[in-house]
Image (spheres, grey):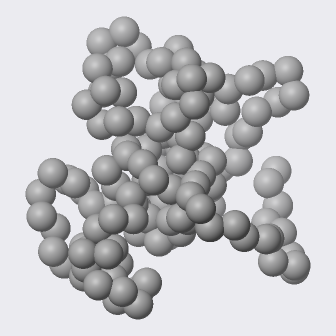
């Protein structure tokens, strides 16, 4: 199992991230997000009180407030028309209904297609402006 996100980003001559076109790469990157960054819950249509209590504790807030931090309102969740076309182009015809059912988008931080109703430990508020910290950068090769 992968312990690091497989970085396969856009080449200068490509407009779509590799994970939108390669289901194995997308699945590996999603599993890393689950294992390392708490991506979930497994079924966002269920109450999941333990999942949200854990997020609330980690973020030093209430479970109700944690419930509001979803991929769909994360600053790195991309549902631009261009990205949605990349996602649609990468799916088999019968799989395209999943885009609407899950409000699928692309996580620019962890490099996989994700559902708007989920969250992870690295959620970033849209209005929040942040600067990258100085220090070592992870090798993206």
| Whole-percent x, y for residue 139 in the image | 82, 61
**Residue 14 on image: x %, y %:** 78, 22
Q: Residue furthest front?
A: 127
**Residue 122 left/right relative to 10:** left
* Residue 111 visible to an observer of this rendering: yes
Which residue is at the front of the view, 50 or 7?
A: 50
**For the point 43% across and 44% down, which residue is it?**
114
Position of 141 relative to 49 (above/below): above
Q: How many marks?
A: 0
54 displayed left or right of 112: left
Tell me the residue at 79%/54% (across/down).
140
**Can residue 32 be seen in the rendering of this structure?**
no
* Residue 134 x/y as whole percent: 87, 78
Task: Please tell me which residue is depicted at 27% across the width and 61% down the height of the picture.
Answer: 41
Residue at figure coordinates x 70%, y 47% from the top left: 7
Q: Say left or right for 5 vs 66.
A: right
């Amino acid at each position: 199992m992968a312990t690091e996100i497989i970085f396969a980003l856009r080449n200068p001559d490509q407009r779509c991230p590799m994970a939108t076109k390669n289901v194995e790469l997308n699945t590996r990157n999603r599993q890393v997000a689950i294992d390392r960054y708490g991506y979930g819950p497994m079924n966002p249509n269920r109450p999941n009180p333990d999942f949200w209590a854990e997020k609330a504790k980690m973020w030093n807030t209430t479970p109700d407030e944690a419930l509001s931090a979803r991929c769909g309102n994360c600053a790195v969740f991309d549902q631009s028309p261009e990205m949605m076309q990349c996602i649609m182009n990468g799916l088999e015809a019968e799989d395209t209904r999943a885009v609407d059912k899950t409000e699928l988008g692309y996580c620019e931080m962890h490099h996989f297609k994700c559902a708007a109703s989920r969250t992870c430990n690295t959620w970033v508020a849209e209005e929040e402006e942040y600067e990258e910290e100085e220090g070592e950068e992870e090798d993206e090769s």
